[in-house]
Image: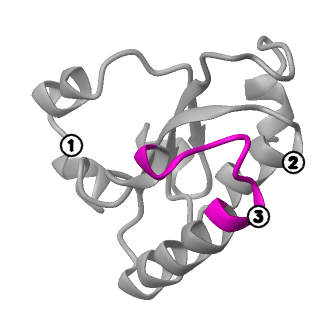
């Protein structure tokens, strides 16, 4: 599914893309982007499950070590804090504060909420 969202961008872009992952679980959308050789400049996770969010934090740290050429700490520093875990609490002001978003990944049940 992530390939559909990333198809517009060439592999290895130097400026990176910004991804918002709605109901993204343990940040597997981020992993898919890296495995497709994309540079990700910013990643934001909207996930209401507290266990999944904790697992995502650990997963992102491990990915940072595994894909050092495709991201920096800045990519994930605000991943869990910039937007709330509950999609219904995300305001227009919050959306604007993160700037340009290249891709919004929406996993179930986020597809119906987005």
Question: What SS does tag 3 mark?
Answer: helix
The residue carrying mark 1 is 90
Check the image and report above or below for 8 versus 78. above
* Among numbered discs 3 and 1, the one appearing first in the sequence: 3
Tell me the crowding category of disc 3: few under 14, some 14 to 19, or many 20 or more residues within 10 angstroms, Cα based: few
Color style of the picture? one colour
Indicate the quadrant where residue 98 lies: top left
Q: Is residue 58 magenta?
A: no
The residue carrying mark 2 is 35
* Among numbered discs 3 and 2, the one appearing first in the sequence: 2
What's the residue at 84%, 19% (across, down)?
A: 7
Q: Label 3 to label 2, Cα distance in Å?
A: 11 Å
Locate residue 39 relative to residue 102 in the image: left or right: right
Locate residue 102 relative to residue 83 in the image: left or right: right
Question: What SS does tag 2 mark?
Answer: helix
**Residue furthest out toward the bottom:** 51
What label sits on residue 57 in the rendered view? Answer: none
Image coords of residue 72 (percent x, y): 54, 46
Tell me the crowding category of disc 1: few under 14, some 14 to 19, or many 20 or more residues within 10 angstroms, Cα based: some
Q: Is residue 65 magenta?
A: yes
Image coords of residue 93 (percent x, y): 11, 26
Range shown magenta: 64-74
The residue carrying mark 3 is 66
Q: Nearer the viewer, residue 41 or 98?
A: 41
Q: Nearer the viewer, residue 7 or 90?
A: 7
* Among numbered discs 2 and 1, the one appearing first in the sequence: 2
């Amino acid at each position: 599914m992530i390939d559909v969202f990333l198809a517009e961008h060439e592999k290895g872009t130097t400026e990176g893309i910004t991804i918002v992952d709605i109901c993204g679980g343990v940040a597997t959308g981020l992993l898919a982007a890296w495995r497709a050789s994309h540079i990700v400049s910013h990643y934001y996770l909207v996930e209401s499950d507290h266990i999944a969010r904790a697992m995502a934090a650990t997963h992102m740290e491990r990915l940072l070590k595994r894909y050092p050429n495709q991201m920096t700490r800045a990519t994930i520093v605000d991943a869990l804090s910039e937007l709330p875990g509950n999609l219904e609490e995300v305001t227009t002001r919050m959306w604007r504060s993160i700037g340009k978003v290249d891709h919004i990944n929406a996993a179930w049940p986020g597809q119906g909420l987005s």
